[in-house]
Image (cartoon, rainbow, N blue to C red):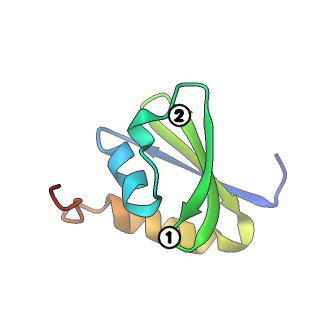
């Protein structure tokens, strides 16, 4: 990996929900050894499973934005609406 990327770990019992709020994918259905490229809100990103959650990678130029949207999506009270 190079300094051109920013890496974030999203862990905990609601990690898949955090990813689901930002990307049009079913993170809970991601196979153990798979990587998924997608968009998180308005920026390119990729993620894969780690122990207890997911690792998210994006461009360093969008690191502040990724940090903000991941933090907001993980904040209590920002749950997904029931289906």
Residue 15 location, quadrant? top left
Q: What percent of the width, then of the height, locates residue 21?
A: 37, 60
SS at mark 1? Answer: loop
Q: Residue at x 75, y 58 (%)?
A: 5
Sequence-first tag of 1 and 2:
1
Give the x, y percent position of residue 41. 50, 70
Which residue is rendered at x = 63% and y = 38% of the image?
A: 35
Q: Is residue 39 left or right of residue 71?
A: right
Seen in the picture, residue 34 relative to 10 is either above or below; the reply is: above
What residue lies at 17% left-to-right and 55% top-to-bottom?
A: 83
Categorize mark 1 by other alpha carbons within 10 Å: few (<14), some (14-19), many (20+). Answer: some
Q: Nearer the viewer, mark 1 or mark 2?
A: 1
- In the rendering, at what x and y percent does residue 33 appear? 61, 25
Q: Is residue 82 left or right of residue 2?
A: left
Residue denoted by label 2: 49
The residue lying toward the viewer, choosing from 42 and 7, is 42
Count neighbours of disc 2 (C-alpha within 10 A) and say few if under 14, some if 14 to 19, many if 20 or more: many
In the rendered view of the protein, which quadrant contains the N terminus?
Answer: top right
Report the residue marked by disc 1.
41
């Amino acid at each position: 990996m190079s300094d051109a990327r920013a890496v974030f770990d999203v862990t905990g019992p609601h990690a898949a929900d955090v990813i689901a709020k930002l990307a049009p994918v079913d993170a809970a259905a991601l196979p153990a050894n798979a990587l998924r490229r997608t968009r998180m809100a308005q920026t390119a990103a990729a993620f894969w499973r780690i122990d207890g959650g997911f690792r998210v990678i994006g461009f360093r130029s969008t690191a502040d934005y990724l940090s903000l949207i991941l933090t907001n999506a993980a904040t209590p009270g920002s749950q997904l609406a029931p289906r």
